[in-house]
Image (cartoon, grey):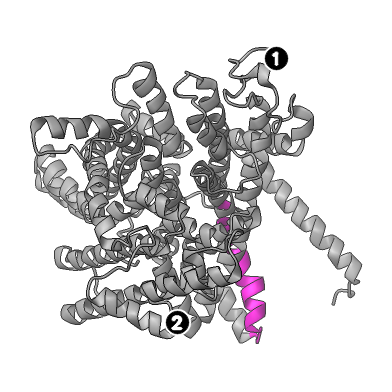
């Protein structure tokens, strides 16, 4: 029998265990060619977001520079200035990173949190909880996402945190469904059966045995849904429905359109925010796909890419929620049979 | 067995629809006691008495003077008669009349996007699957990774910038007279086609790639099935196997999912319609949002949700009828 550890020791051991686990995962991602690209892009964006005030050469909110209106890219203004207000586009781009990353990553993490709790509850507890949650998922998948987001921002307000809340409230469904089908498999595994026979409580089994089994899915889905939410946020701001006080890439594009960038040939004003969105989404997606590949080596790369792109309609919010919905196709049968390629029919929907 | 499944499926769809209707009714009422305040938000320059009179008039006009429960019953009664409600717009037009005038224009965009995407996408997907690992396949994979990170409205802006303004190939904004001057003549139709070119182009790229990717994976999955091996063992020619055995079986899921993708397309089309000022349901929805016209917004939502429910139902039933391998029963 081991000597009982004090609370402090247990705490530190927990921390070091998790840190070393995260370190090992990062090392694996770094060793992967595609993963390196994703990791570099994401950490670059995070640094830019943190140090935005020291990187940005001008005040992005400064609309008083009358002399500097509509300048093309030059050494003073790396990405030129806006036509109507003379704001420095490079500085706006830098500050826009913050909104995108905060909204994207916060929503991604919250979605993973909510989705895993509800998915594990539905899968392990079964019965009424399961029925209720899965009916709710069915209903939410039927309502068109972008219009619903617009209605909710109208009713609840357009504050930064409310928008995150809306994204989380609508985004957990697909993940919960996937987790549920994975849990259904784990539930029948021998170690869970053993724990049940040993008299472990349901809570203990759910948190200590089942939840860790879904962790690779959670890490991947956090990266992928962050990417998806970034596109969604950009779209919402583009429609002028984002937080009105923040500078975001979507809003920059909307201002470019209404401010005459198209008419006066200010290509830099359109390309810059688009490039920002592209870098962020691409980086996070790369990272997510590589994480999936590391966690589940039997799943081919094409299959994970396919899962993402099958959901790629022209619609961007749809894209997010539907791509998450597609995870359901790593359904119970597939996980059990070793994650072979399988074309989901969507019949289980 | 099959019949009971069909009945069960239909009943479940009706249940989902009922819940969606209920949500539709209650979401705009979140946070306000009096729906009349949604119609007419408090104004600074109005005395309390005046405001109260205005609200009372509104209540009577829109049936808000009865209890919420009674309003809900009235809403359901109206829906049963095909009445989606009355818009808050001046002149109180019926929601359905507003939608009816915009629906065809939206469908012009989404249906043509879908059809072009389907035809080109399937051709390209088959090509990529057949030439697995060759440059065609790699191109598709790389194109799809890049495209998913580019939002459609950004592509729309770029297209509008170059094709619309710089090179003036297509109109960058929809001709405001397109709808009013429309006639079923060659001239009228070609004008619509010209104006629709950029919106369709900007949505088409994503659509092509998603169908291509889907087809490619489906074809490869079917190629690995046993019956293909059997066909090969029987000595059938490569083309017979390719077109009769593989293609037919891999297209089934794609074709049946078309219904669902239409309503998804319309929902996502909001942004594209906004970019090009296209006179469709997307812009109608945004107009409704800007004027807090809740009945109109909820009417559009209800229509889209209803359409999605219907297409999921039809897809499921068609599947059961067509594909003998699908096992019927509650798989949950």
Chain letter for the residue marked with disc 1 in the picture: A
Judge from the rendering whether residue B299 lies leftward or rightward of residue A77; answer left or right: left
Residue beneath disc 1: A76
Element assignment for label 1? loop
Residue sitting nearer the eye, A75 or A229: A75
**Badge 1: residue crowd in 10 Å (few <14, some 14–19, many ≥20):** few
Q: Position of residue B119 (x, y in %)?
A: 20, 39
Residue B327, magenta (yes or no): no
Task: Determine if residue A199 is in view.
Answer: yes
SS assignment for the magenta stretch, majority: helix
Residue A200, magenta (yes or no): yes
Judge from the rendering whether residue A96 lies leftward or rightward of residue A324; answer left or right: right
Q: Are marks 2 and 1 in contact (CB under 8 Å)?
A: no
Residue beneath disc 2: B68
Q: Which residues are the magenta region?
A: A198-220
Task: Determine if residue A311 is in view.
Answer: no
Residue sitting nearer the eye, B181 or A317: B181
Q: What separation in Å lies between label 2 and label 1 (alpha carbons)?
A: 61 Å
């Amino acid at each position: 029998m081991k000597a009982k550890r004090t609370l402090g020791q247990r705490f530190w051991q927990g921390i070091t265990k998790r840190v070393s686990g995260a370190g090992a995962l990062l090392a694996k991602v770094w060793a992967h060619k595609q993963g390196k690209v994703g990791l570099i892009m994401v950490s670059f964006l995070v640094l830019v977001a943190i140090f935005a005030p020291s990187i940005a050469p001008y005040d992005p909110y400064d609309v008083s520079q009358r002399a500097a209106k509509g300048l093309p890219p030059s050494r003073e203004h790396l990405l030129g200035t806006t036509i109507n207000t003379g704001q420095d586009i490079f500085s706006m781009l830098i500050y826009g990173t913050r909104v995108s990353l905060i909204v994207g990553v916060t929503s991604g993490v919250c979605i993973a949190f909510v989705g895993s709790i509800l998915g594990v509850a539905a899968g392990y507890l079964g019965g009424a909880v399961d029925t209720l949650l899965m009916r709710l998922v069915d209903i939410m998948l039927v309502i068109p996402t972008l219009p619903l987001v617009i209605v909710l921002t109208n009713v609840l307000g357009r504050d930064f945190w409310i928008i995150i809340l809306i994204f989380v409230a609508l985004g957990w469904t697909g993940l919960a469904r996937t987790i549920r089908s994975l849990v259904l498999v784990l539930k029948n595994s021998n170690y869970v059966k053993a724990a049940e026979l040993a008299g472990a409580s349901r809570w203990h089994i759910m948190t200590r045995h089942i939840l860790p089994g879904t962790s690779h899915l959670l890490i991947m889905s956090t990266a992928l849904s962050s990417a998806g939410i970034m596109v969604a946020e950009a779209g919402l701001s583009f429609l002028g429905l984002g937080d009105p006080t923040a500078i975001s890439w979507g809003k920059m594009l909307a201002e470019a359109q209404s401010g005459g960038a198209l008419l006066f040939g200010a290509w830099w004003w359109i390309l810059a925010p688009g490039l920002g969105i592209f870098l962020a989404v691409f980086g996070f997606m790369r990272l997510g796909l590589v994480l999936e590949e590391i966690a589940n080596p039997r799943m081919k790369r094409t299959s994970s890419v396919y899962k993402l792109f099958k959901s790629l309609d022209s619609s961007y919010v749809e894209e997010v929620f539907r791509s998450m919905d597609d995870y359901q196709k790593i359904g119970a049968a597939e996980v059990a049979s070793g994650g072979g390629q399988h074309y989901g029919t969507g019949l289980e929907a | 067995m099959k019949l009971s499944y069909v009945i069960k499926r239909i009943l479940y769809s009706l249940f989902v629809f009922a819940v969606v209707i209920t949500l539709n009714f209650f979401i705009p009422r979140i946070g306000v006691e009096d729906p009349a305040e949604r119609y007419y938000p408090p104004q600074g320059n109005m005395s309390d008495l005046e405001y109260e009179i205005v609200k009372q008039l509104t209540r009577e006009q829109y049936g808000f003077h009865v209890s919420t429960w009674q309003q809900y019953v009235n809403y359901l009664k109206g829906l049963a008669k095909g009445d989606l409600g009355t818009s808050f717009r001046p002149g109180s037009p019926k929601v359905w009349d507003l939608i009816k005038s915009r629906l065809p224009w939206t469908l012009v965009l989404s249906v043509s996007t879908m059809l072009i995407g389907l035809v080109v996408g399937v051709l390209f997907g088959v090509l990529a699957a057949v030439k697995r690992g060759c440059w065609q396949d790699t191109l598709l994979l790389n194109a799809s990774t890049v495209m998913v990170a580019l939002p459609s409205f950004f592509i729309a802006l770029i297209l509008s910038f170059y094709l619309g303004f710089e090179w003036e190939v297509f109109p960058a904004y929809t001709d405001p007279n397109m709808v009013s001057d429309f006639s079923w003549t060659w001239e009228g139709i070609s004008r619509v086609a010209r104006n629709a070119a950029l919106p369709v182009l900007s949505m088409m790229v994503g659509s092509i790639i998603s169908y291509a990717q889907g087809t490619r994976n489906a074809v490869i999955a079917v190629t690995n099935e046993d019956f293909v091996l059997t066909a090969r063992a029987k000595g059938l020619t490569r083309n017979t196997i390719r077109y009769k055995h593989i293609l037919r079986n891999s297209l089934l899921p794609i074709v049946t999912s078309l219904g669902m993708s239409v309503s998804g397309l319309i929902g996502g089309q909001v942004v594209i319609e906004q970019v090009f000022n296209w006179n469709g349901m997307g812009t109608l929805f945004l107009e409704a949002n800007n004027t807090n016209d809740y009945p109109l917004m909820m009417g559009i939502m209800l229509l889209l949700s209803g359409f999605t429910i219907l297409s999921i139902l039809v897809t499921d039933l068609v599947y059961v009828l067509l594909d003998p391998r699908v096992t019927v029963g509650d798989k949950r």
